[in-house]
Image (cartoon, rainbow, N blue to C red):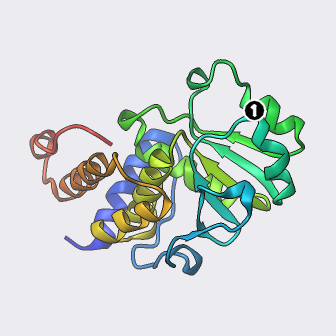
Amino acid sequence: MSRRVFLSAVCLAAVVALGGGCALKPSAPLPAAETGAMTQVPASALEGFVQPAEGLHAGGRIHATDLPALSAANVRHVIDLTPDEETPDFDEAAAVRAAGLRYDNLPISGPDDLTVANVIAFDRLLEGREGTTLVHCASGNRVGALAALRAAWLHGADDQSAVEEGRRWGLRGLEGEVRKRLDRQRCLALAADADAQARCGTGS
């Protein structure tokens, strides 16, 4: 089956999940800025984070004490992929906003949240980012997982290219879960009937 049909199936899943439409470009390559080698950010406030695209840094957890330095390093927008309960003693939303930065939260607790709907939400946050942006979870692993699925489902990357893209963003321990979801979406796209879809397994 063609890539166009496969991506159309992903779009259909997103329509069901979100109640709206989506426009995919089956043959479109990843944006040029997101295909280069992952580089370390030289600013001391961003040491330990990676720069998968111009003006975009990705990595692990931040703390209130990091915010003055992040602001001084020209970070203007923080996208947090962690649920509030992971840091009960730190109100990140309030702290980031008090520092004068934009804050958005897309809580990804684990593999069960690696859904088409959340990948689309992640893509929209990245498309709407304002200024230099830091996107993080606890270690960067969840960031990388969403980036890999975004590359495959929304930008038409093949599975291996998508996984490599995710690694550039921090994908490590969730790689197996990412591959399972990529396999399942392909299975669903090829399924001829409900029985065949049921044999595709769970996930995504």
Q: Is residue 131 visible?
A: yes
- The residue that label 1 is drawn on is 93
Image side of residue 81 versus residue 163, left or right: right
Give 19 or 143, whichever is nearer the viewer.
143
Give 48 or 78, whichever is nearer the viewer.
48
Image location of residue 5, percent across then percent down = 29, 67
Number of numbered tags placed on the structure image: 1
Report the residue at 18% width, 54% height from top: 187
Q: The residue tagged with tag 1: helix, strand or loop?
A: helix
Report the residue at 81% width, 59% height from top: 73
Image location of residue 188, percent across then percent down = 22, 51
Image side of residue 15 versus residue 183, left or right: right
Q: Identify the image quadrant of the N terminus.
A: bottom left
Amino acid type, residue under disc 1 in the picture: Ala
Image side of residue 84 versus residue 155, left or right: right
Q: Is residue 158 visible?
A: no
Based on the displayed image, in which of its 4 quarters is residue 7 positioned?
A: bottom left
Image side of residue 161 versus residue 124, left or right: left
Image location of residue 97, percent across then percent down = 84, 37
Q: Identify the image quadrant of the C terminus.
A: top left
In this rendering, the answer to whether 11 lies above or below 93 is below
The crowd level at tag 1 (other Cα within 10 Å; few <14, some 14-19, many 20+) is some
In this rendering, the answer to whether 186 lies above or below 99 is below
Based on the displayed image, in which of its 4 quarters is residue 160 positioned?
A: bottom left
Report the residue at 50% width, 60% height from top: 169
In this rendering, the answer to whether 74 lies above or below 86 is below
Based on the displayed image, in which of its 4 quarters is residue 2 positioned?
A: bottom left
Residue at the extreme front: 44
Image location of residue 191, percent across then percent down = 15, 53
Report the residue at 50% width, 50% height from top: 143
